[in-house]
Image (tube, coloured by chain):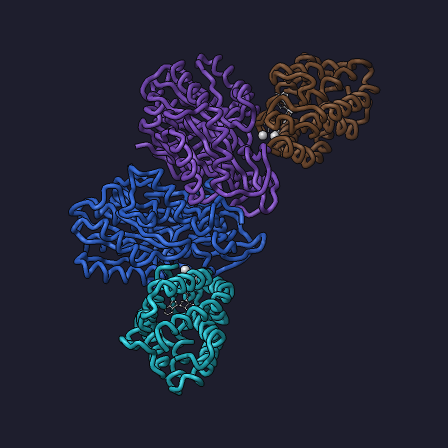
Chain colours: A blue, B cyan, C purple, D brown
């Protein structure tokens, strides 16, 4: 295990302390637990608050999407583990500006159980909440069970759109509806080449042979749907893209936003090689790429690999993506 | 069994239970994300520490609640959240009494299983911890004298683990493997079995309560 | 070699095609060679142009620093190899707005020889040029030979400041003086944990044992100054920081900009663990961190490791860093 | 030797020379960035291709210029830039003549070395390609009949490679190793030696020019 860390059990708190030291102008912690982080100006009176959260190890997810035009607060747990309900609730109180709070996070059991407990705590304090789950990984369930899919990189579309809706003054139900609309029109698929090593155990999250890849892998190393010989970039792009296009029933004339996301160790150069093929294939099919994101948006520590996400666009979705936003990791100017 | 005795029995059991952390982590790696080993080690340590800080006069229900709280926050995860809720539900069986009454183990186990079933929207056959919990609870309930119970419960839990291995996972992370989950052993169900086995090894069978 | 690529010899052109497809609003290629890239609005009449360049494999360096308030153009070569003088010259012509062109790039022989040839070509066409070399890697030469050091991540400070100076209308000599001033006040040191594999050869750029690290390594895998057992994050931070503080003769009351840069495969979490220690150490020494950058700014494909750069600040340097800038990879808003 | 004959001799030489690409890459890895193997393979291929496209009537100088241009652009790098400049300087020795005159090899080699020395601000003893080039040029100049030349030049270049291995690199990437460069063999000097050896193996010694 080759990591630049100190005591493994202090890893999460230490990188969070680093974030707080680096960006005091953008984010703060409401109490003294660095695992709860809210925008520097929280709570924003009269604005719907958005709280996200989940396990550590996915930077810039989740911490990186706290800011103006994005989420208001985040609670995160140990590497790949949920925050506690108490932490979620603390974030909730810190961002509540009187217009209610949307919980927007990935569909993982641990997170769901802990956020749901916080829903009850918030209700007791008179803070209305709504919950929308990111569930974009098409490799995890067939279309009929789309709501049971796990949430991966595509959730950033929902952060961006719901964050913009909240910023312009939409009500809690409206912001939740925006998030739900985005989630239902987002599809993602990933490929893994090398595993993540968990800092606390020192063990790889999965094992692949020297020339193997795994299509459909989850961002915690959850097994995928196809393991085989490493393919070329174009073949991989085709493998990932075809199910996404089918899932969203894309046809000529449609518009999409594309996210080519690196899982941690894959060079940006390779992500652009993938993007090239995705762009060419979509364009050839008469589908317009109206917005694109290429880089690391949701990682899995030092996993090598990538994911491709598509969001089917209409005018209102695109407008929300293009609205101004600013966090330490994400700027739309 | 007083609250203090219960706390000691739990601590002894947990000391053995954490030896299974690696096994549970490995099983969870094959079917999920591999963190169950951590949840179990951190959770057991937190629960043990919480019990050490507890007043000697604590009731059995208070002992269980302290464990629930510690386990929930140590490494929050599916298992932590479900177990914490299950202990909470179980603690209600114990009421305010200063002693665990004979025969309460079965009711406790059943309430715990039902809580998980409700919160997890899951049943026996979904290939989760419940595939070990419900059969074990039934075995405990079947004979109220506590002695036969634990061995029978362990047998029932083990049978549940084995039976469910052949099934497809329908809940949680493992469900994303779809038909590829068939043949892999459920880590949560195994954890429950190992917990019962640790209890038996750590405490004389008669002490099960 | 586990890479998401197609034909290795097409790797560079393909990722560049991807960049051009993704960011047509920000960058363009003046001819049909994707290795030459200029800002979408180049040439900007009356503004000093800045051309940079070097080998591929360092994204976001160099391509990522072409935009408003940054460089105007770039010419890049094969992985870790120089662009040709013809390519540099083509970039020069495309960005020349009549106020001359600054060549600002890292101090590597291949680059120097090719940029110098282009200086001659530009002179023949009546385009005045100045050259400033990034030479911030303190591990490569002692202080007395500072001008012979190789250039690494710290060059982004010079891009940012010189770009801002050019944008506000400084003359060619003034922009060159700004760049030179920044270069002379920048110091960097890096650590490598795992090597890069060159796509064309499939060979690692260096070899380290399972628990080894190398301090002072170059971004092409050039050997460093100390190879030893992997240390903790805090020890590594201390190892890298001390020579930088000495090199810049920092004392209590000074202000600095800090760049904690990932070399490719190192998770952002680990960079923040490093940043935490750097920030704490500097603060404890009475040195103010007035600006910070944490992330991947100059990489070496999938090398695991990091570098720390310091820029000694004064008011004018800080003002230039804070000026607005925008490229596909770098936004200062 | 006509331009056409020269072009063929170069192509035969380059075909053998590229076999050393791995060796040169490995040496460059130890002292630099490991790309010299690529520079040499891509450069040799580009030069060979350029020569194939050249008019049969091309003069020796035109042949050399075509190689220079191809090599400069194939994989631009220190070596590519220096070699291209060196060939340019050497081509001036050949003038407009349609034949390479006997004895011109030495003058060519010296002009080439001087060009690199000037552009690279480097001398013999700095542990670069020049530590092989200057001694070889002197050996070629010492006996004007071309036959003895090449073997003597190879010997001189080899001695230069060996001698410089004990020195500290003072130019280019290798200089950043400072005293740790001592004992490592210079890739550029080795490349020059391998080039001469390839020439000898590919072409009968008498053909050297
Ligand atoms: N909905 C559910 N109902 C009951 N048990 C569940 C449910 N989901 C998961 N489990 C149990 O939890 C175990 C995994 O626990 P854990 O590793 O903590 O989950 P995760 O890492 O996904 O948060 C599974 O093996 C299964 O027994
Ligand atoms: N200034 C210089 N003068 C002469 N030769 C040089 C100089 N710098 C480098 N070299 C030669 O170039 C060789 C390395 O070539 P190359 O691998 O192309 O360099 P790089 O990868 O650093 O661009 C060295 O082994 C040395 O012989
Ligand atoms: Mg988990
Ligand atoms: Mg798990
Ligand atoms: Mg090179
Ligand atoms: Mg080299």
At horizontal 51% and vertical 28% (from top left) the residue drawn is C137
Left or right of A78? Residue C232 is right
Furthest residue in direction front, as rendered: B56
At horizontal 38% and vertical 25% (from top left) the residue drawn is C254
The quadrant the C terminus of chain D occupies is: top right
Task: Please name whichever residue, D54 or C185, is drawn nearer the observer in this view of the structure.
Answer: C185
Using the rendered image of the protein, determine whether residue B78 is visible from the camera's viewpoint: no
At horizontal 34% and vertical 34% (from top left) the residue drawn is C331
Left or right of B150? Residue D159 is right
The correct choice, above or below, for A87 with respect to C181 in the image is below
Percent of width and height locating residue B30: 49, 63
Task: Please name whichever residue, C264 or C12, is drawn nearer the observer in this view of the structure.
Answer: C264
At horizontal 39% and vertical 62% (from top left) the residue drawn is B49
- The image quadrant that residue D122 belongs to is top right
Left or right of D173? Residue B120 is left
The quadrant the N terminus of chain D occupies is: top right
The correct choice, above or below, for A82 with respect to D114 in the image is below
Percent of width and height locating residue A181: 26, 55
Percent of width and height locating residue A296: 41, 44
The correct choice, above or below, for D112 with respect to B65 in the image is above
Task: Please name whichever residue, A124 or C27, is drawn nearer the observer in this view of the structure.
Answer: A124
């Amino acid at each position: 295990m080759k990591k630049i860390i100190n005591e493994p059990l202090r890893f999460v708190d230490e990188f969070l302390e680093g974030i707080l030291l680096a960006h005091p102008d953008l984010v703060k912690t409401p109490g003294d637990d660095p695992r709860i982080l809210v925008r520097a100006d929280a709570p924003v009176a009269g604005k719907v608050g958005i709280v996200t959260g989940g396990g550590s190890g996915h930077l810039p997810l989740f911490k990186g999407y706290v800011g103006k035009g994005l989420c208001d607060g985040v609670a995160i747990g140990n590497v790949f583990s949920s925050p506690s309900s108490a932490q979620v609730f603390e974030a909730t109180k810190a961002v509540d500006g009187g217009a209610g709070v949307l919980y927007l996070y990935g569909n993982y059991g641990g997170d769901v159980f802990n956020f749901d407990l916080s829903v009850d705590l918030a209700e007791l304090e008179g803070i209305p909440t709504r919950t929308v789950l990111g569930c974009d990984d098409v490799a995890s369930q067939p279309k009929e069970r789309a709501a049971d899919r796990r949430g991966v990189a595509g959730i950033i579309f929902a952060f961006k759109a719901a964050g913009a809706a909240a910023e312009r003054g939409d009500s809690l139900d409206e912001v939740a509806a925006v998030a739900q609309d985005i989630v239902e029109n987002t599809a993602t698929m990933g490929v893994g080449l090398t595993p993540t090593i968990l800092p606390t155990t020192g063990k790889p999250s999965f094992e692949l042979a020297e020339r193997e890849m795994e299509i459909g892998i989850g961002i915690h190393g959850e097994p995928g749907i196809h393991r085989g010989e490493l393919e070329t970039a174009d073949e991989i792009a085709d493998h990932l893209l075809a199910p996404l296009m089918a899932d969203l029933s894309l046809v000529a004339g449609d518009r999409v936003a594309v996210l080519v996301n690196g899982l941690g160790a894959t060079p940006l150069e390779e992500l652009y090689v993938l993007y090239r093929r995705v762009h060419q294939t979509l364009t050839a099919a008469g589908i317009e790429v109206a917005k694109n994101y290429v880089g690391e948006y949701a990682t899995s520590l030092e996993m090598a690999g990538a994911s491709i996400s598509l969001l089917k666009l209409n005018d209102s979705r695109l407008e929300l993506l293009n609205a101004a936003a600013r966090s330490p990791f994400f700027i739309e100017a | 069994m007083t609250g203090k005795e219960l706390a000691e029995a739990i601590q002894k059991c947990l000391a053995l239970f954490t030896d299974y952390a690696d096994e549970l982590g490995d099983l969870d790696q094959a079917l999920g994300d591999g963190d169950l080993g951590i949840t179990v080690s951190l959770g057991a340590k937190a629960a043990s520490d919480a019990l050490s800080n507890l007043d000697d006069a604590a009731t059995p229900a208070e002992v269980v609640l302290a464990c629930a709280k510690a386990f929930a926050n140590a490494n929050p995860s599916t298992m932590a959240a479900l177990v914490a809720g299950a202990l909470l539900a179980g603690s209600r069986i114990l009421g305010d009494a200063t002693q665990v009454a004979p025969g309460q183990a079965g009711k406790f186990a059943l309430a715990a299983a039902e809580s998980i079933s409700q919160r997890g929207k899951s049943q026996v056959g979904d290939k989760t911890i419940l595939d070990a919990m419900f059969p074990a609870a039934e075995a405990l309930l079947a004979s109220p004298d506590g002695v036969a119970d634990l061995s029978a419960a362990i047998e029932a839990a083990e049978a549940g683990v084995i039976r469910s291995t052949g099934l497809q996972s329908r809940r949680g992370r493992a469900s994303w493997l779809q038909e590829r989950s068939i043949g892999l052993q459920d880590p949560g169900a195994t954890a429950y079995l190992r917990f019962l086995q640790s209890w038996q090894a750590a405490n004389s069978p008669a002490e099960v309560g």
